[in-house]
Image (cartoon, rainbow, N blue to C red):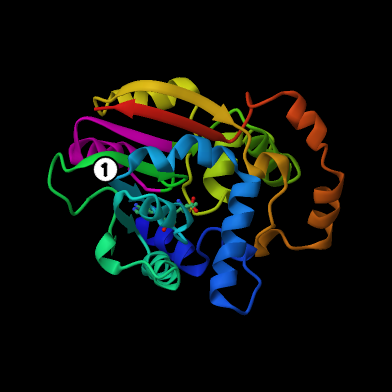
């Protein structure tokens, strides 16, 4: 199953559709601008500056925007991704920024089998990744293992009930006359890589606690999928999606605040 996940992310690394420039440096800057414009909550959640000189592991670097910021803010950063495309893009991006390769460590690896010794990191960070892997519980146990006692994990996983879940349910269940299929299943089958999971707040807390973490903060946030302020992927590139994107009642979604956001932001301690 992780082969299917890998295939999906090798085909299109997260966020690259926001890059349009011919110039590679500018292309990466476009990706970064779009990322923090659509999801300013990342900056507040990650607290890049707080981890100067700390040993940080990022699981699932994707195109490397956050990873670059760990390195630039002075963390002793290690990053992994299931795809060689993700780690290659991240390396290219750091090299274009003139960052000495001795200042970071990047490799292709699976979050379910981290190639690190026990207790080496002070912080594990993972944005939008752990719900993609086949055995999320195992990946969380691995994060626990590689953290030092007292170390922190900061992770974003997908949340239900959420606007994105309901949108996918409308599109792939109700409109296909299969209303009994749940939003959770719609996310599983149609949101990004096959088998993507989403959790209620209680389920996420339990998931991390069963890996022996002590949850210190858990909250939800609206994501670009909920607000439909994303650049649609190729799968959603038709005329009808353009109309939906224009007519979507973002004001109504905002009115409910973060309660039904797709992003579940969790911090926990070992
Ligand atoms: C939605 S993207 C997020 C990337 C990045 N964190 C971001 O926010 O742009 C998911 C990433 O997780 C990676 N991934 C999925 N399963 C993984 C696993 N088992 N181990 C490591 N990385 C994984 C994918 O290759 C992909 O780059």
In the image, residue 31 lies in the stretch drawn in magenta: no
Indicate the quadrant containing the N terminus: top left, top right, bottom left or bottom right. bottom left
Residue 168, how many percent across, how many down?
66, 43
Q: Tell me if residue 174 comes above or below residue 150 in the rendering.
A: below
Under 8 Å from ligand 1: the CB of mark 1? no
Tell which of 191 and 80 is nearer to you.
Answer: 80
Residue marked by disc 1 = 54
Left or right placement of residue 57 versus residue 44 in this view: left
Residue under the point 22% across and 42% down: 121
Q: Tell me if residue 26 comes above or below residue 9 in the rendering.
A: below
Residue 38, how many percent across, how many down?
65, 47
The span picked out in magenta is: 133-155
Residue under the point 83% across and 37% down: 249
Q: Tell me if residue 204 comes above or below residue 164 in the rendering.
A: above
Left or right placement of residue 74 versus residue 265 in this view: left
Under tag 1, what secondary structure? loop
Residue lying farthest bottom? 22
Mark 1 crowdedness (10 Å alpha carbons): few <14, some 14-19, many ≥20: some
Indicate the quadrant containing the C terminus: top left, top right, bottom left or bottom right. top left
Residue 65, how many percent across, how many down?
48, 56
Left or right placement of residue 232 versus residue 23 in this view: right
Residue under the point 63% across and 23% down: 259
Quadrant position of residue 187: top right
Image mark count: 1
Quadrant position of residue 21: bottom right
In the image, residue 137 lies in the stretch drawn in magenta: yes
Residue lying farthest left? 117
């Amino acid at each position: 199953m992780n082969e299917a996940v890998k295939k999906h992310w090798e085909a299109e690394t997260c966020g690259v559709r926001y890059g349009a420039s011919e110039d590679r440096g500018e292309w990466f800057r476009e990706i970064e601008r779009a990322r923090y414009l659509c999801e300013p909550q990342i900056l507040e959640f990650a607290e890049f500056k707080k981890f100067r000189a700390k040993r940080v592991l990022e699981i699932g670097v994707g195109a490397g925007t956050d990873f670059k910021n760990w390195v630039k803010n002075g963390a002793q950063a290690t990053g992994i991704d299931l795809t060689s495309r993700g780690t290659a893009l991240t390396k290219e991006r750091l090299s274009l920024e003139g960052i000495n390769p001795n200042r970071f460590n990047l490799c292709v690896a699976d979050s379910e089998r981290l190639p690190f010794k026990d207790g080496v990191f002070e912080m594990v960070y993972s944005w939008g990744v752990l719900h993609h892997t086949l055995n999320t519980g195992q990946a969380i146990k691995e994060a626990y293992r590689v953290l030092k006692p007292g170390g922190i994990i900061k992770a974003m996983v997908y949340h239900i009930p959420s606007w994105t879940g309901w949108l996918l349910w409308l599109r792939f269940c109700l409109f296909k006359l299969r209303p009994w299929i749940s939003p959770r299943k719609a996310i599983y089958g149609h949101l990004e890589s096959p088998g993507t999971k989403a959790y209620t707040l209680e389920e996420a807390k339990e998931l991390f606690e069963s890996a022996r973490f002590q949850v210190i903060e858990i909250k939800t946030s609206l994501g670009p999928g909920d607000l439909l302020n994303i650049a649609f992927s190729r799968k959603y590139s038709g005329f009808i999606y353009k109309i939906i994107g224009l007519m979507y009642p973002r004001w109504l979604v905002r009115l409910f605040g973060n309660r039904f956001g797709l992003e579940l932001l969790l911090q926990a301690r070992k």
